[in-house]
Amino acid sequence: MKCPNCSGDIKYTPGKAKAVCPYCDSQIQISMTAEEREFERYTSRRAHNRDKYFKELKTWRVIFYISLPLAVLSGVLLSLSDSAFLGLPAIFFIFAASPVLRLAAPDIPKDLEGELSKKERPLKKGALYGIFIGLVLLGGVVTGLIKDDSKPEEGTASSSAVSQADTAE
């Protein structure tokens, strides 16, 4: 590269926006090459895709965490129900919520596929099924334990009935 003022040789360092002539100290603005512009566009597009993906993943996780207590609640309704109508939410969560949540998960951009950790990816469908079935069962078991504790055992009198019988004598 030659200096436009003194025609002296200038050493150009790739990636720099300015070059200085060692002979006349004039500064020359250097425009980006086509390769540098393409690389700049690629990194900008990649950063935009990454930000967009993580924003969508955060929204998906909020929906996922909101649905977890609903799965437990559906298990509670299933164990409390004497009719089949109240068991429908549990069946819904077991068979419908997992695939719907998986379909709603954001797609991983192709340029990020190899570098994301497990925490930066949405859960797989099998894991979602396991979580929802486990939470529905947990809600049912906890409700069953609470219902069993609230019923007095047969054959034993309550303490108030015994104390009333003692005072009557």
Image (cartoon, rainbow, N blue to C red):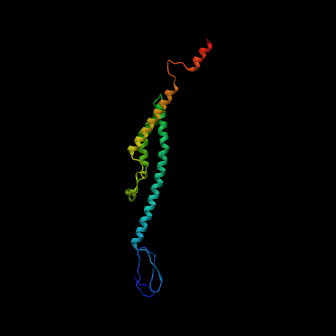
- The quarter of the displayed image where residue 129 is located: top left
The quarter of the image holding the N terminus is bottom left
Q: Is 145 in front, or is 73?
A: 145
Q: Residue furthest right?
A: 167
Q: What x and y, as percent, mark residue 147?
A: 50, 28
- The quarter of the displayed image where residue 126 is located: top left
> Compared with residue 86, is residue 122 higher up or lower down, i.e. above or below?
below
> Compared with residue 101, is residue 27 higher up or lower down, i.e. above or below?
below
Count every numbered label the image shows and give the total: 0
- The quarter of the displayed image where residue 98 is located: top left
> Compared with residue 74, is residue 46 higher up or lower down, i.e. above or below?
below
Q: What x and y, as percent, mark residue 58?
A: 48, 51
Q: What x and y, as percent, mark residue 50?
A: 44, 58
Q: What x and y, as percent, mark residue 3?
A: 43, 84
Q: Residue furthest bottom?
A: 6
The residue that appears at 62% across and 14% down in the rendered structure is 167
Q: Is 136 in front, or is 8?
A: 8
The quarter of the image holding the C terminus is top right
Q: Is 127 in front, or is 10?
A: 10
148 relative to 118 in the view: left or right: right
Q: Is 132 in front, or is 94?
A: 132
